Structure formats: C-alpha cells, structure tokens
Image: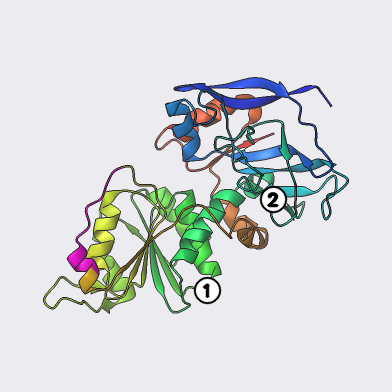
Amino acid sequence: MTASMKVATVTGPGKAEVLDADHPQPGPDDVLVAMRACGICGSDAFYITIGGIPPRQGHTPLGHEPAGEVVEVGANVSGIAVGDHVVINPMATPGNIIGNGGAAGALADFLLIENAVRGKSLEVIPSHIPWEVAALNEPMAVARHGANQCKPKASDKVVIFGAGPIGLGATLAFKSLGVSHVVVVDLIPARLDKALQIGADAVINSADEDVVARLIELHGEGESGISGFSRRAGTNIYLDAAGVPAVVNTALAAAQKGATLGIVGVHKEPVPVEFVNVMSNEITIVGSMGYPDEIFEVTKDIVANWERYAMIVSHTIGFAHVGEALEMASTPGAADKVVVTF
C-alpha cells in the first residue's frame, strides 16, 4: 500500500480541495476499508459554504455516506473478513464523527474504522448490491427514523412532502413498515414519477393541484376538533421532508383530529404555528434527527429491495472528479442524489 492517500477536505469558506493524507494504520481492534462509494449530502455543501465545522474549522474532511471493501482486519475483530463489502455507521467511531467534523471523512481512498464491531460500527452486505446503492444506507437510515418517529400503524394513511432522497426513502420506509396508503407531494413531475416507481400509492403536484382537496379525495374527510372550521383530510400522518414553511402550513391546515406531523426536513428559518389549531385538533408534532437505532435496521430493506433504492441515485461521479460532484450536489435542481464512486 502507498504511504499516502487522497481526501476531499474543506480548506476554507467556499473552498474544498483534494489533499494528501497519511495512509491509515489499523490496530488490533480496527478495520481498514477501501472506499468504493460515498454519497454527497446537503450538509456537505453547507460545510463548504461556512468553511468547515469545529473543531476542525478550515480543515474538515468530507463524506459521511460510505460503502466499501474491507482490506485489513485487526486481530481482535470478529465477524469481519478481508474482502467483505460493508456499510458504515459514521456516528459510531469513538470520540469522532466521520465526515461531520471528525478527523476522517469517507470521500477518501481509505477509511479507518476504530474499535470496529459488526452491527454497531459497520455491517456486511451481499456482494451483488451495487456500491452506489450501498452508499444510500446512511441517508436511508435518516428517512427510516423519520418514519419510525411517526409511529405508523398498518391502517394509517400517510402523506410525505418532498420527493428528494429522504422523502423517497421515507416512502420506502413507510411501505416496508406496512402502511396501507402513501401519498407523495412535490413540485417536480420527474420526482413524482420516481415516487410512483418506487411504490407510492399516489402523488400530488402542489404546483397545479389543491393539496388538501386531493388528500380529501384520496384519504376521505377527517374529523375536525373545531366546529365550523375548514374541511380536514382523513390522513393520519404528515411527514415534512422538504423543510419549507408552506409544508407545515398546509399540513396543519389539513390535519384531522389526532393526526401526526413529523419533521425530518431541515428548516432554515422559524415557522409560525397556530397552536389553537394544534390544541383543538390534538395534533402531535414530532421532530426527527439522525438515526439512533436505524443505521443497520434499514440495511436489510436495502438489500431486499435494492432495485427500488437504486432509482433514488440520479448521478454517479468518479472520485477523480469529486469537485464536480460536490458542485453538482450543491446546485439547486442539478441533481437528486449524487454518489461518488472509487
């Protein structure tokens, strides 16, 4: 092996470069993974814009959606072998967070997994799963946690706002959890087509349809806790995977008594909420962040249904052109999901 490797790194505000770094040296409790694919997240563009995040402001290694092949295994590690294809939990390394301000990032030739434990820090996947699909494991865990937070029942009727990667992942999550009817709302026809292809029961184009009226058509009319108030949809769960105020406003205007509004999309500005409505209709509002338990829960579903998950990836770009990949992922409308391959 060479003495150095390449790592995509934030080096200042608005600037990311590929730098040389020391080749990782695994100890007896560690596993060394040769990267094969790494997805690009919206947070990567944010880190570049602000010049990195503490404690490595100005020198933040990027990449937290990794999949790769095991090339070295420490003597004390069990259940992992050289040649295994693995997905990785970027939050499980001791005192470190891969690609989120830690000392290492997955947009690199190699990634060292310290204190490696199968089922906690990494998990083996079958070799037939395409690398770019395996790299969806981390964002799909985010989507799965968003669905789990809403505590769905099989009889529930669900609407998801936003048909980006997390919204599509949530669609797959709700269907995997046995939900009876899932509607996806977006402004972009191509995204709505993709939602139908991966298993949504219906879609609504909010650019030219009345969302509440269509939900009433699809899910029936629901009960309102305020007499004489506007008509309510029979939808049980609303999931905001878009992170825009209009979604919250629409969901709360449509929500029937006892409905749940889950927030997994990142809101960049405060959203006013009419709490008399929330109280009167006993609406549950629940937030979702990360994946406390779902990082490898979702792996089984990806393996079982990888062809559907594959449709979420819109672009694959080689690591030699990682700058182009980062720019594409940060340009609104340029791509849905970009995965860097090695």
Residue 217: x %, y % from top left: 28, 72
Q: In which quarter of the image is residue 264?
A: bottom left
Residue 199 visible in image: no
| Residue 131 percent across, percent down from the top left | 68, 45
- Mark 1 = which residue? 178
Q: Residue at x 40, y 53 (%)?
A: 241
Q: In which quarter of the image is the C terminus?
A: top right
Front residue of 106/211: it is: 106
Q: Is residue 116 left or right of residue 74?
A: left
Determine the residue positioned at 11% across, 76% down: 228
Name the one closer to the observer, 104 or 185: 104
Local secondary structure at mark 2: loop
Q: At which x and y percent is residue 18?
A: 61, 22
Magenta segment boundaries in residue numbering: 269-278
Please identify the residue farthest to the right as the structure is shown: 75
The mark total stands at 2
Residue drawn at x 75%, y 52% is: 117
Residue 275 is a magenta residue:
yes
The type of residue carrying mark 2 is Ser
Q: Is mark 1 on a helix, strand or loop?
A: loop
Query: Dot 1, crowdedness within 10 Å: few (<14), some or many (≥20)?
Result: some
Foreground pick, 74 / 248: 74
Q: In this view, does 320 lie to the left or right of 256?
A: right
Q: Residue 121 carries which label?
A: 2
Q: Which amino acid does label 1 sit on?
A: Gly
Give the mark, 1 or 2, whose residue is nearer the N terminus.
2
The image's colouring method is rainbow
Task: Give neighbour class at mark 2: few <14, some 14-19, many 20+ (Cα, 10 Å).
Answer: many
